[in-house]
Amino acid sequence: MVQFIHTVIMSEIKNYEEVVEIASKHLGTVGGAGYKDTYAPDLLVKIPRSLNREGYGLTGEEFVGVDTWNCYEVSAITTKGQPVAGLLKIVCPSNSENHVESKSIKLYLNSFNMTKIGDNAADCITGIEARVKRDLDELLETTTTVSFYASDFETEPLSFSDEYIDLSEATDLDKIDFTAFKSDSSQLAVADKDPEVNELKLRSNLLRSNCRVTNQPDWGDVFIYMKGSELPSADSLAKYIVSHRTVSHFHEEICEMIFAHLTDRFKPEQLMVSCLYTRRGGLDINPIRATHSSLIPQFFTDPEFTIRKTLRQ
């Protein structure tokens, strides 16, 4: 079991400014500037994961995981002008040096719109997958998995929603006084001990935060699995999740911060945290972090499946 101490240090403020400077390369464009419709890999912007982690005492070695992106607005044309459109699934390991800034990948994928690839639809799909994988692998200095779905696709038979108890069923939310809205881990409290209970599987759609760059709201469903001698009470977990409501962080950072806080407070034997975010700008981002790779469900990484959507998604 990996143990670490979560600390917020002044580098968080410095890194915030650095992240904004990097990501703002494509923000605030007017009149469609920056929206290219022919292949433009130079649009991609990378952000070092260390900029998000340093402020929380994380190195990335505390967990395993992936970021799974579902991109819904992907299209190119064949050499005969036939449009090919579909969903692109991108899986990036959490141990990569960098992650991609979301606005930049949206613009990058839009640049395929009038790009001619292949003589037929099948070759076009293969070409899109190959180009995206090559560009992301080079940019992020890692190995990604890229899958294009041009028609109906399968969803994992067992989704998180089927396996996890909603917090609204685990406790009476109406009786809780929610007073913290700035990522307050002190809200977490140990549940009354039950010798027959050493596991927790809870989900909640109360997760809300803001984009670290644009301050636009991000909505998500959080899923938590924990095994250990101490578990959080449902009341305290609800308060803690709600406390992220006004903070500004990337999706990946929120997931890792929750993982860090739970590890610090409860020292679990096993822990899995996943945040399934709603679609914004034609894509959704779904990070997952776990103590063991066996805790990561198949649909996050398998190219044959996509993530079954939650109600909000």
Image (cartoon, rainbow, N blue to C red):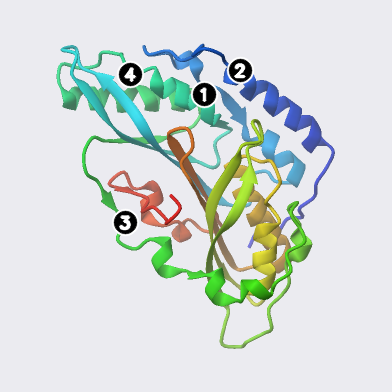
Q: In this view, does 142 lie above or below 55?
A: above
Q: In this view, does 226 lie above or below 288?
A: below
Residue carrying label 2: 25
| Left or right for 255, reference 142 | right
Q: Where is residue 202 in the image (x, y as percent from the top left)?
A: 53, 68
Residue carrying label 3: 156
Q: Where is residue 66 in the image (x, y as percent from the top left)?
A: 49, 45
Q: What element carries label 3?
A: loop
Residue carrying label 1: 104
**In the foreground, 43 or 197:** 43
**In the foreground, 291 or 297:** 297
Q: Do the residues labelled 1 and 2 touch (CB within 8 Å)?
A: yes
Q: Earlier in the sequence, mark 4 or mark 1?
A: 1
Q: Which of marks 1 and 3 is nearer the N terminus?
A: 1
Q: What residue type is labelled 2?
A: Lys
Q: Which of marks 1 and 2 is nearer the N terminus?
A: 2
**In the foreground, 142 or 184:** 184
Q: Do the residues labelled 1 and 3 touch (CB within 8 Å)?
A: no
Q: Nearer the viewer, mark 3 or mark 4?
A: 4
x 36%, y 53%: residue: 308
Mark pair 3, 4: CA separation: 29 Å
Q: What element carries label 4?
A: loop
Mark pair 2, 4: CA separation: 21 Å
